[in-house]
Image (tube, rainbow, N blue to C red):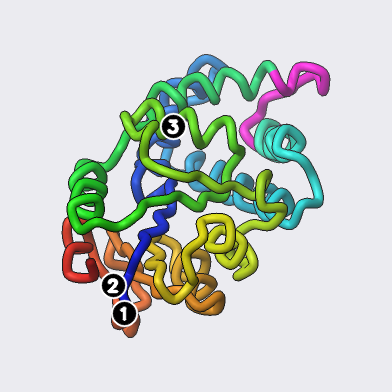
Amino acid sequence: MIVRGVLFDLDGTLGDHDGSVASALATWLPTLGVPFSAEVHTLWDEIAERHLAAWRRREIDFREQRRRRLRDFLPTIGISYEPEHLDDIFAGFLVAYQSAYHAYDDALDALAAVSAAGMAVAVLTNGSSVQQRAKLDGMGMAGLGLVWTPEELGVAKPNPAAFRQACARWGIAPGEVLSVGDRHEFDVLAARAAGLRAVHLDRQGIGPHDEPHRISSLRDLAIYL
């Protein structure tokens, strides 16, 4: 079956989320009187994932998951706070993160290759609609194509229903769509469960190494187009 559309993940695929978080923490933490370290970065990521998972399950809204992250994170690094100030505190991190967020150097080349091959492009991302579209705008990808988030679909990756709904709204059969993303469970296994084709973008070479459709750069995506 011919591929008619390529469905990209955003964070970790087109945009450097991890690098942007590290840069943001290095900027923001000193304003709280806390030095940046790899250990603090790891702690931040672990706490974030726990509460983002609750958001993906639609148990809490996006603002509440941010508040819960800070409720867990701040005491651990020795910072006291007033509950009513949590949104303002998170805003300091968010400004630094948004300023640091940038595209990977292979992203625009990959998008150009997909366009040159005559295929449609869309994004399926686990993030808030406003924030994710702002990221695309900031990377010069505002005209990229359709963008779907859990806020619009009512379901998030790795639920295969997110992919099925995206394809239905796109008007392209799942078997004619290629999913590309950095999280194997979210972007590859879930996509295949929904009937899509999928390629794992493994930038760090961490595997799984038995994945037959694995690339280390979006520049290698051309072999699938």
Q: Nearer the viewer, mark 1 or mark 3?
A: 3
Magenta part of the chain? 75-87
Tell me which residue sits at (20%, 46%) in the image. 112
Residue 108, x across and y down, in percent: 23, 42
Tell me which residue sits at (20%, 41%) in the image. 105
Assess whether mark 2 and mark 1 are in contact (beta carbons under 8 angstroms): yes
Residue 98, x across and y down, in percent: 45, 25
Residue 214's disc number: 2
Residue 79's disc number: none
Q: Residue 127 magenta-drawn? A: no
Residue 135's disc number: 3
Q: Nearer the viewer, residue 182 or 4?
A: 4
Q: Residue 78 magenta-drawn? A: yes
> Which element type, helix, strand or loop, lies under badge 2?
strand
Q: What type is the residue that disc 1 sits on?
A: His
Tell me which residue sits at (40%, 71%) in the image. 176
Q: N-terminal of the two: label 1 or label 3?
A: 3
CA gap, disc 3 to disc 2? 26 Å
Residue that label 1 marks: 209
Q: Residues within 10 Å of mark 3 (few under 14, many from 20)?
A: many
